[in-house]
Amino acid sequence: MKNTFNVLGVAGSTRQGSYSTRALKIALEYAKKQGAEVRLLELNRIVLPLYDPSAPASKEVERAAEIIAWADAFILASPDYHGSMSGTLKNFLDHFYEEFAGKVFGYIVASHEKGLTVMDQMRTAVRQCYGWSMPYGVSVNGPQDFTGNETASAKSSSRLRMMARDLVVYGRLVRDQFIRDFGSNEADTFAAHYRP
Ligand SMILES: Cc1cc2nc3c(=O)[nH]c(=O)nc-3n(C[C@H](O)[C@H](O)[C@H](O)COP(=O)(O)O)c2cc1C
């Protein structure tokens, strides 16, 4: 069984100074303190083309695919756009929907409300891709929760720390069991569907 545990943060805001991306960076630091390896995929740096199932993979798609293959778990961070996740993040999920089975997902939303409908949408999409969702997410309200450049309010920091901790602990359990089931001959498992 692998000892390392890889967490990929996916930043779904393209805005300079994005609060959801700031919160994501903080969560990744906490995940690192829990012993995880972490990487950040900023969708305003690797700009994916609008998903077209009939198009050949572009260089950006190939680069992102390599990072996604590395990940054991994900933290998706999105702005609240009209109660929905950003189009950028949805486009990311459309591109890589086949890569999420057996992986655990945590969620961060930047919203002036609570971002609950945004989280519901992310969970729905991830469920359709056979990913496992954390039962709660972290919502940040930018102007209230962020004072300086990288610091969040004590309450937000504490929730981000809890989420990062739980993602690493529960994510490992799911990842390890998925690998065991995948490698066994047992027929009636979820992972059996992914054997070649
Ligand atoms: C097009 C658009 C739609 C938005 N819709 C909502 C909304 O429905 N509810 C809300 O609370 N905030 C809404 N906002 C505010 C953003 O969610 C908020 O500014 C958030 O901080 C953006 O995330 P970011 O800082 O990570 O870019 C909207 C902003 C934009 C630009």
Image: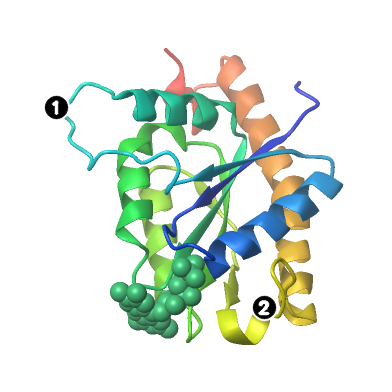
Position of 59 with respect to 135 (left or right) is left
Q: What residue is shown with label 1?
A: 54
Q: Can residue 133 be seen in this view?
A: yes
Q: Is mark 2 on a helix, strand or loop?
A: loop
Q: Nearer the viewer, residue 184 or 61?
A: 61
Position of 6 with respect to 185 (left or right) is right
In the picture, residue 58 is in which quadrant?
top left
- The answer for how far apart the CA atoms under marks 1 and 2 are is 42 Å
Q: How crowded is mark 2: few (under 14 residues within 10 Å), some or many (20 or more)?
A: some
Residue flagged by tag 2: what amino acid is it?
A: Phe
Percent x, y for residue 76?
52, 54
Residue flagged by tag 1: what amino acid is it?
A: Ser
Front position among marks 1 and 2:
2
Residue sitting at x 40%, y 75%: 117
Q: What residue is shown with label 2?
A: 146
Q: Which of marks 1 and 2 is nearer the N terminus?
A: 1
The quadrant of the picture occupied by the N terminus is top right
Percent x, y for residue 20?
55, 65
Query: Is the residue marked 2 within 8 Å of ligand 1, measured from its CB?
Result: no
Position of 152 with respect to 112 (left or right) is right
Percent x, y for residue 68?
51, 32
- Looking at the picture, does residue 128 appear above or below residue 185? below
Q: How crowded is mark 1: few (under 14 residues within 10 Å), some or many (20 or more)?
A: few
In the picture, residue 107 is in which quadrant?
bottom right
